Image (cartoon, grey):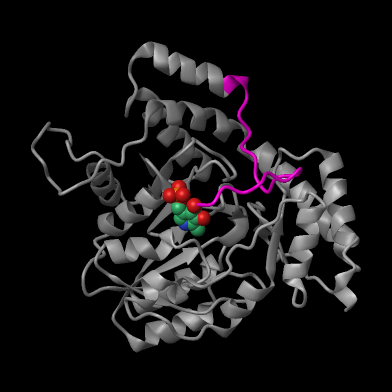
Amino acid sequence: MTPRTAAAIPIARPQIGEEEKREVLDVLNSGALVAGRRVAAFEAAFAAYLGVPYAAATSSGTAALQVAMLALGIGPGDRVVTSPFSFAATSHAVIHAGAEPVFADVDPATCNLDPNAVEAVLRRGRVRAILAVHLYGLPADMLAFRQLADRYGVLLIEDAAQAHGASIAGQRVGTFGDAAIFSFYPTKNMTTGEGGMVTTANPDVTRRARLLVDPRGDEEYAYEVVGFNYRMTEMAAAIGLVQLRHLDERNEQRREYAARYSNAFADLSWLRTPTEPPGYRHVFHQYTMRVPRHRDAFSRHLTAAGVGNRIYYPRLIPQTPAYRRRGFGGAFPDAEQLTREVLSVPVHPGLSPGDVGAVIDAVRAFQGAGA
Ligand SMILES: Cc1ncc(COP(=O)(O)O)c(C=O)c1O
């Protein structure tokens, strides 16, 4: 990727403190660097935090997605309905499992997969799973997806890479599906450097996931599956244990900053602030506005004012070269409109209240909106 010039107020900044540094040093001094007691402790703590029986750590969110697909038995001949408006690791994992992603349009109010569009795909048949993404930290409509999954006899999988701690009516994401995945990439609401997690209530899925992550298995070198090496390191788990303890307070900080933005922008008719349906807890991995006109001029204005800003995502997965070559494409009018309108501004807990004020001032100072 092309290195970007650092903005005065960056779009993301991982929060790494003295505790994490001490814990990593302890691991290095211990000499036990991989898949040891800290990984086991992190898995147990993460599962307990969510309220789900099992969690299996991986080396990334992408690895967790691949492992979840295979552990659920998804493979050639299967179709998996998912969102075209996500980071491409979501649908890449379906392809890597030998199955076929089928893209359905999103609800423009939430930017998440639209249950009606998903049902239209389910009616056509041959679908094995729904793979819902909790984009920007806002839960997808899991109650509708659970009903659809039960009615059509398909699996439900959650891509919660951006939504640690988000919930619907108090139930945390990562507990609704037959399996779910998380990412601990540095920009996420909590990080381990690189890392991921598969969560599930199914002991067989957990066992298969663990074997795929570390194919040596319980009986050494008696390979039960054709697995990978997707193990989490002890250094990563040591960081994750500390980060998990701070997750709720940091999500609260994100929510507070998001509320300040939404209040400050309420009178600006040229932009739309993010929605949070009743009972949903949005954890604002991103604070993403919609700017129907002049989005790109607005982005340049913010950059000139030193405010980091990004478009997540400027194009739909099925319309990228890798997917077009495989025969994907299709029309997704609502998702396409979002690619032209969305813009995210910094909302992470590394911001000072003064930074938040500076973002508000920069947004409000945009003159091009009335043109
Ligand atoms: C929605 C989504 N899915 C999957 C991933 C993949 O996670 P990772 O970068 O840890 O491989 C990411 C993050 O980058 C993501 O945002």
Front position in the image: 103 or 12: 12
Percent of width and height locating residue 12:
65, 45
The residue lying furthest to the top in this view is 29
Q: Is residue 266 left or right of residue 70?
A: right
Q: Is residue 156 left or right of residue 230?
A: right
- Whether residue 271 is visible to the viewer of this picture, yes or no, is yes
- Whether residue 175 is visible to the viewer of this picture, yes or no, is no
The residue lying furthest to the left in this view is 222
Q: Magenta residues?
A: 1-19
Front position in the image: 84 or 151: 84
| 10 part of magenta stretch | yes
Q: Is residue 358 left or right of residue 139?
A: right
**Magenta-colored segment: predominant secondary structure:** loop
Image height of 224 relative to 134, above or below: above
| 362 part of magenta stretch | no
Q: Going 45% across and 85% down the picture, which residue do you hit?
A: 330
Q: Quadrant of residue 150?
A: bottom left
Looking at the rendering, in which quadrant would you find the C terminus?
bottom right
Percent of width and height locating residue 95:
30, 66
Q: Quadrant of residue 68?
A: bottom left
Image height of 31 relative to 92, above or below: above
Image height of 87 relative to 369, above or below: above
Percent of width and height locating residue 205:
28, 51
Percent of width and height locating residue 81:
40, 74
Image height of 218 relative to 325, above or below: above
Q: Going 87% across and 47% down the picture, which residue do you hit?
A: 357
